[in-house]
């Protein structure tokens, strides 16, 4: 199972919006509604930000949103804040009943 | 509150095995799968496999098959992950994480495994 494809880095200024893409195949992203996004700050465990493509866990700001089209999922962060600077990983369930992660995207808030 | 508390850091020599533990609390242990995910220094997340604490069934990533074993002890709500034939490439932080179905939600704090001669 190959890793999902994410851009290595994205950046934006405070208050702006950014979108991180995550591309897979019909055997993972395209075949299931089980796409998640995680935020990871240095030295910390990942934190769930989006699940089931576009659902937010309790406590996650509504500035974070998710979507999917075909084999590509996206995470959008609106109204960027300094504390959003972190690494972001996408994740999908797969046809082989496994999970696969993206390579990660480093978000820099300018 | 949901907690996944992992065992402490380990230092192992090449060729040895390591066993990490993940003790769950704050929810019904047998109702959620437990996954193991590792992260090498400066690298991304890599899924290793999953165990169903209810019956003990497992599903391992092809990369680790034959080298990883996941077990559980329902009396202590603890899941174990053993990785054998360690090499320097296995140096990483190993996380456990739970899922109800296909989406992981809570993560443990991680266990650092260092493989060095």
Image (cartoon, coloured by chain):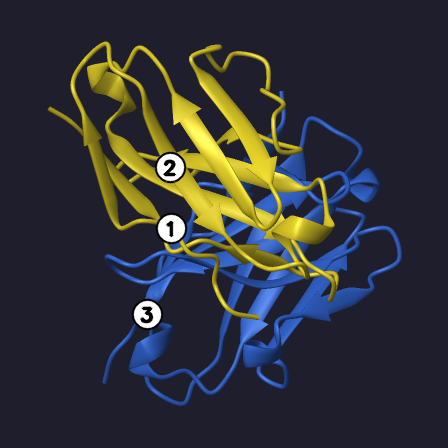
Chain colours: A yellow, B blue
The disc at residue A6 is 1
Q: CA distance from mark 2 to mark 3?
A: 29 Å
**Residue B10, x across and y down, in percent:** 36, 64
Label 3 resides on the chain identified as B
Q: Chain of mark 1?
A: A
Give left or right: position of A107 versus B24: left
Q: Is residue B19 visible?
A: yes
Q: Residue at x 59, y 37 (%)?
A: A68
**The quarter of the displayed image where residue B61 is located:** bottom right
- Residue B65 percent across, percent down from the top left: 63, 81
Residue B12, x across and y down, in percent: 35, 76
Report the front residue among A6 and B29: A6
The mark lying in front, picked from 1 and 3, is 1
Chain for mark 2? A
**Quick check: do tags 2 and 3 share a chain?**
no
Q: CA distance from mark 1 to mark 3?
A: 24 Å
Q: Nearer the viewer, mark 2 or mark 3?
A: 2
Helix, strand or loop at label 2? It is strand
Q: Residue at x 48, y 44 (%)?
A: A90
Can you give x and y, in whole percent of width and height, for residue B43 in the image?
30, 59
Q: Say yes or no: labels 1 and 3 on the same chain.
A: no
- Answer whether labels 1 and 3 touch (C-beta < 8 Å): no
Residue at image mark 2: A20
User: Mark on residue B91?
Assistant: 3
Q: Are the residues at dot 2 and dot 3 in contact (C-beta closer than 8 Å)?
A: no
On the rendered structure, is A109 left or right of A74? left
Vertical placement of residue B113 versus B90, above or below: above
């Amino acid at each position: 199972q190959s890793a999902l494809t994410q851009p290595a880095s994205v950046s934006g200024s405070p208050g702006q919006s950014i979108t991180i893409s995550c591309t897979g195949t019909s055997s993972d992203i395209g075949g299931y509604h089980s796409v998640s996004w995680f935020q990871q700050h240095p030295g910390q465990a990942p934190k769930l930000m989006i699940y089931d493509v576009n659902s937010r866990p309790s406590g996650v700001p509504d500035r974070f949103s998710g979507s999917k089209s075909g084999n590509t999922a996206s995470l959008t962060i609106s109204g960027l804040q300094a504390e959003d600077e972190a690494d972001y990983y996408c994740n999908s369930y797969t046809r082989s009943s496994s999970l696969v992660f993206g390579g990660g995207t480093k978000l820099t808030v300018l | 509150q949901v907690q996944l508390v992992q065992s402490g850091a380990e230092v192992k020599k090449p060729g040895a095995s390591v066993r990490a533990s993940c003790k769950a609390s704050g929810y019904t242990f047998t109702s959620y799968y437990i996954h193991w995910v590792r992260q090498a220094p400066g690298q991304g997340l890599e899924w290793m496999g999953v165990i169903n604490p209810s019956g003990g069934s497992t599903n391992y990533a092809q990369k680790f098959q034959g080298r990883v074993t996941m077990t559980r002890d329902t009396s202590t709500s603890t899941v174990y992950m053993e990785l054998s034939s360690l090499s320097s490439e296995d140096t990483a932080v190993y996380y456990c994480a739970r899922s109800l179905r296909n989406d992981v939600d809570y993560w443990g704090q991680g266990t650092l495994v260092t493989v060095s001669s």
